[in-house]
Amino acid sequence: PKIARCKTPVGVNFYPETRVFRLQCRDSMYAFRVDDNRNLEHLYWGPSLCEEDDLSYLTMANAVTMFDPVGEVSVAKILGLDELESMLHDEARLTENWKIYTKQKDHVSEEDVPRSRRLENASWRLWTRERFRGGDLNRDLSDATLMDALGMVEQAATAKLAQVAELKDAGSHKQTPSKIEPSLPSKIRPIASAGEPGSAGSGAYVQGTGVDPSALRHAASPAVQKASANQDGTFGGARSSSMHHGPNGVHFSLVPSADRLAKSPPLHGVPRSVMDLHKMGNDGGAHRARMGSGGAGNAAWSSLHHHGQIGSVAYLPGLEAQGITPPDASDAMPVQMNWTKLDPEAIGKNTKLLEFSDKGTGDYREPSFTVTYADGSQVAPMEYRSHRIIRGKPFSEQYVPHVYTESIDEATTLIIEMVDSVTKLVIELYFTVMHNYNAIVRRAVVINRTNDMVRLERLMSCTLDLDADHYFMTMLSGGWARERQVVQRELVDGLTQFKSSRGASSHQFNPFMAISPGRNASELGPSVYGFTLVYSGNFVAMAEVSESRRLRINMGINPETFQWTLERHDSFATPEVIMSFSQHGLGDLSRDLHGLMRQRLMPSRWRSELCPVLLNTWEAAYFNVTHEVVIEIARAAARADIEMIVLDDGWFGKRNDINSGLGDWHVNREKFPYGLDALVREVNEIGLKFGIWVEPEMVSYDSDLHRKHPDWALHVPTRGRTTGRNQFVLDFSRRDVRDHIFQQLSDLLCSSNICYVKWDMNRHLTEVFSHEFPAERQGEIAHRFILGVYEVLGRITRAFPDVLLETCSGGGGRFDAGMLYFSPQIWTSDNTDAVSRVLIQHGTSLAYPMRTISAHISAVPNHQTARVTPLKTRAVVAMCGAFGFELDPREWREEELIEIKNYVALYQKFAPLIAFGDLYRLWSPFDHTIGSSAAWMFVSENRREAIVMALAISREVGRLNPLLKLQGLSTTFVYAVDELLPGTLMRNMSTGAIEPAAHGVYQYGKTLRISGDTLMRAGLPLKFMFDADCVMLHLKA
């Protein structure tokens, strides 16, 4: 028997015969196809499948639904060309009838000339176009294709009749009636000639889908390239993209046009790697076009644009300087796309599983995008036109957060071009397969190639339909001081969504969700689909169960607060979505996401470096900071081996409370008479580093900046202004505002030896209106605001790469993947209570690495909850992230100082294991079936070492916990189990009272030596004495 290959090669694999794309990640696979109507139909997402299986059979799950729109009346019929409609499926008949119509037009009566010539020209154009696009006429032609062909014919025929009429009139000086066919609707435009504005390409291109063979042979010539470059930056039918200088060098370049290069911002530094474009060939007789981690030589850097039979090579200028010789364009291998009818029956869009959905053409679910054309219409059916497969990961938008690569062998990107064939609006869908992860990164780019302005009303970063099942959602919600609580719910018929319209990702909802079939997701199962939006502004996440029980996922920018005007040739790109899959529950999903974010999202400068142990002055002094106070705090902190002092709010302008000073980022000389530089020098002499707090996006009404530039705040001129914390929001959509803030921050960081910046944002956006933009662009301001914030963050981190940045937003109000691109850690919550933090940090860890979670020991009673917890418990919880202190060290008693010093030493010893190890959540504080307890552990990469932490949220007297079963260990290793922090309280069995113990209270009283297999199967017994009691264990093999 034939043995099937049980795993598709990693990367993007295309099967022309079935029009199926397989996107193979490390251990999972994602598949979809192009159906007969050129929609992208989702097939599968899950564990890897056998390569030999044709997944098209999965479409048999489709079922015709009553009253769903199916089929259409062709334009040929509407225009009365019934003869042409009857032969659209037969190339031979169409070819023969073209010859007949050619002869017939000279033998008809004068009044039938227009119709005869229309038939001749339309049949010829359709036949020729199909030849160029590589298809055949043994398939249905779309109405749009026919309309395009007939449009020019109609125009030419009408013009010819008008000319004939004029000549007759001039000859006889009398009107001669003539029969003129009614003109096509105005939105049906003729195809422009090659090279004219609005044309799809140059040379012999037709509708941007064909390639002139002679142009293909000479595509590598720079002269030819320059001569044939389109106005919109395309070459060979492909949209070009400018280079992006990311955190690790330039990652991508396609052929940029001269105009595009002229408009591009200057780039600094030498590219470390330029995108390697891969030439694809036939595998087993054009069986599959493949691109993955393989490839060698020049064959690895050509690009194939699948426009039917002929591929094209994109030439990368400047590569010869790096010793790379461009390949001969004639080496590109053709790929034959099979356009024969494959769908077993006609199925309406509303029933199909789609990767992208338009509005108004039969799919009644939430659409992927909505656009309004100049005539007011919103109907824009998008059809597959072409695709290209590229080694590496292209990205061209400067300062926009994204997953990056450091080698072209780490990823493969599929770019699918969808087009509205009537208006020529283009949407490019990007699917990047991350080879070392079970993750696919998606985004969408819309390009206005129409002849007019269009208004974009909605564009999701990703749309995905899943087949009928019983689905459950896991999401993160909450509020200030209660961020990212785990919420799970069953998805029932209709739309379930969560969103932010606050101008930030918000305390209330986080741009992450997980979907599980069959039951709520747990750490170990069932299969889980994860979606993480790399964005910090207004967002929406939707899960819609249709009447057929199929599920649609949409995630992207919140359309309620978004509009974008696209002039001709303009483009708009969505934020990225990281789509993750785990066959084994939330635990594996989180660990895969953590690895991806640590290695390929966060700044590489801080990838392997940990934050110093710091003390923030906020809860120690609030606004009452002075030179003397800061020095006193620094001296006290140094006694406990703390490494950095961070000067929080109150150091600048006339800032003594929340009523004034924001925007005036110069030192307050009344509080700091010797200036900031003198303060920093004195702190450094004590042996500590120095950090500082800023809130650059805000301005106080009572500030020099607002008095000088009142128009710089977001507001509607004819209305009052809403304040939050007595402050306004600066309009970061304006270039002058961004430049001013950058210059102020740059001057501040140059003024003294500042090693750390805490960037805060303490209110959300209202009255979102900019004086800088016209009325029709006010819907863009919320998105332009966050792009402006990204720009300033990017400029600052590039100018000062060794300054550690920590972002914040009223606590954890902007804890998202977008911020992690600039900041390796984020202030998780203003609530520093240890018990509250267990829930907050547990929820945060579903998507975000523990090392990004800024966690501090604070005073008791806690300033946010008034709860009193032991110092040991506060230390254990704070060690599970970027460790620090939020209290006044001047108040420490001698025994407290000694204890805190020990905690600092313990954290420094195990910080690498906590920051870079694999996290396993053992007991969830949200799962009340095990009692109100939480437990988690960190395991080293080699499985030889682990740290286990457990805490009692609340304890009922006399109740016992189940045995704690560990995870992630090696079954063959034997581990020594030691308790690191013994307890200090015990119950007096004579009185029943809990009292201080004379000696340390241990769980086991000795070192245990147990195999990993037993620890994971049988577990460990844990006994808690009181609320907020905790245990910390060390395992070493």
Image: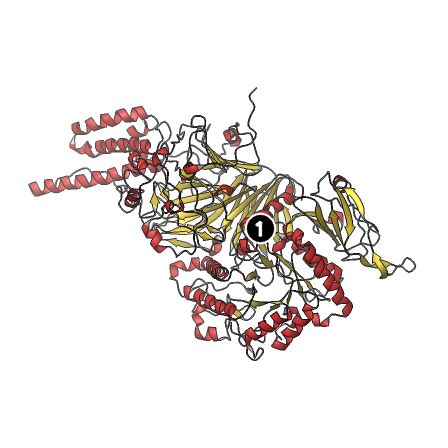
Looking at the rendered image, the quarter that the C terminus falls into is top right
Quadrant assignment, res 156:
top left
Residue 1030 position within the rendered picture, expressed as x and y whole percent measured from the top left = 76, 55
Residue name at image x 49 percent, y 45 percent:
407
Image height check: is 230 above or below 692?
Answer: above
Image height check: is 3 above or below 361?
Answer: above
- In the foreground, 904 or 467: 904
Residue 38 position within the rendered picture, expressed as x and y whole percent measured from the top left = 42, 35
Question: In the orientation shown, which residue stands out farthest toward the left?
Answer: 172
Residue 56 position within the rendered picture, expressed as x and y whole percent measured from the top left = 50, 30
Q: Is residue 619 left or right of residue 240?
A: right
Residue name at image x 85 percent, y 59 percent:
999
Q: Residues within 10 Å of mark 1 (few under 14, many from 20)?
A: many
Count all numbered tags in the image, as a single digit: 1
Image height check: is 19 above or below 190?
Answer: above
- In the foreground, 395 or 761: 395
Question: In the orientation shown, which residue stands out farthest toward the front?
Answer: 323
Label 1 sits on what residue type? Arg
Residue bearing the label numbered 1: 598
- In the foreground, 834 or 352: 834
Question: In the orientation shown, which residue stands out farthest toward the right?
Answer: 990
Looking at the rendered image, the quarter that the N terminus falls into is top right
Residue 1032 position within the rendered picture, expressed as x and y whole percent measured from the top left = 75, 53
